[in-house]
Image (spheres, rainbow, N blue to C red):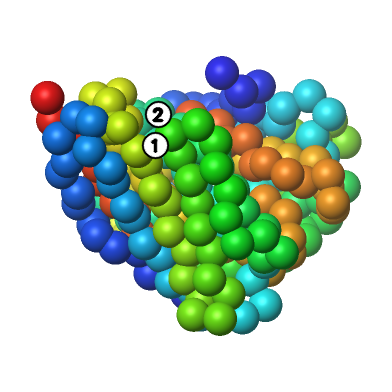
Amino acid sequence: GENVEQHPSTLSVQEGDSAVIKCTYSDSASNYFPWYKQELGKRPQLIIDIRSNVGEKKDQRIAVTLNKTAKHFSLHITETQPEDSAVYFCAASRSGTASKLTFGTGTRLQVTL
Amino acid sequence: ETGVTQSPTHLIKTRGQQVTLRCSSQSGHNTVSWYQQALGQGPQFIFQYYREEENGRGNFPPRFSGLQFPNYSSELNVNALELDDSALYLCASSLPGHLNTEAFFGQGTRLTVV
């Protein structure tokens, strides 16, 4: 089955700096890669996703890049703000949809003032 | 806030007991997936229901079972509870097939097995 590894497990950045979280996946048939943000005690919420026919996607301060050959994808957050502090999860699916997701172990991002 | 609701929010059970968790999907969503999130880990896929049938299962033993009802709500049943079953159980609802562009998660049920 699919295996998703995520690094780093914790990340501390100063407000205004950029943050990068990296994930690798094992199943070359995976074709949908969402990123979720989970604040303490709350549900995971989708922040951005990318499909295998696209190499990069951007939404305001958030961007995701995908390298199918190397089987890795990354989340980039620019101009970080304190409200970006949360746990971020990457995930992968071979169904092309938000279905039967395999998640990474999460990255705890702390944005300090 | 999404329209996915789960009950109960918290639950304490004794090892060996059985538990039923409930999930009401977002309006119009006929696909429900269940995930187990252990402390400090990412969610792990348990199984998915579509049109009242199981439609895919993760690496969980048969004592984890489920149901989906005609109104698309769903139940997760766990028999013979073990201490390692202590976790946050999340359900996610979505549209089927190519329309499944996002899984909307509920707040979860935190199960503690003692």
User: x, y percentage for residue A6?
Assistant: 35, 63
Q: Disc 1, disc 2: CB below 8 Å? A: yes
The image quarter in which residue A16 lies:
top left
- Any mark on residue A97, and which? none
The image quarter in which residue A5 lies:
bottom left
- Any mark on residue A42, and which? 2
Residue farthest along the top direction in this orientation? B1
Q: Nearer the viewer, residue A79 or A86?
A: A79
Q: Amino acid at mark 1?
A: Gln
| Element assignment for label 1 | strand
Q: Nearer the viewer, residue B20 or A52?
A: A52
Whether residue B72 can be seen here = yes
Whether residue B52 can be seen here = no
User: x, y percentage for residue A24?
Assistant: 43, 71
Residue at 53% over, 71% down: A67
Residue named by callout 1: A38
Mark 1: give few (<14), some (14-19) or many (20+) Cα within 10 Å.
some
Q: Are marks 1 and 2 on the same chain?
A: yes
Q: Amino acid at mark 2?
A: Lys
Residue at 29% over, 63% down: A7
Q: CA distance from mark 1 to mark 2?
A: 6 Å
User: x, y percentage for residue A49?
Assistant: 59, 48
| Element assignment for label 2 | loop
In the displayed structure, A1 sits above or below A50; it is below
Residue at 46% over, 55% down: A90
Mark 2, chain letter? A
- Of the two numbered discs 1 and 2 in the rendering, the one whose residue sits closer to the viewer: 1
User: x, y percentage for residue B111?
Assistant: 38, 41
In the figure, is residue A17 to the left or right of A94? left
Residue at 22% over, 38% down: A17
Position of the N terminus of chain B, as image quadrant, is top right
In the displayed structure, B16 sits above or below B30; it is below
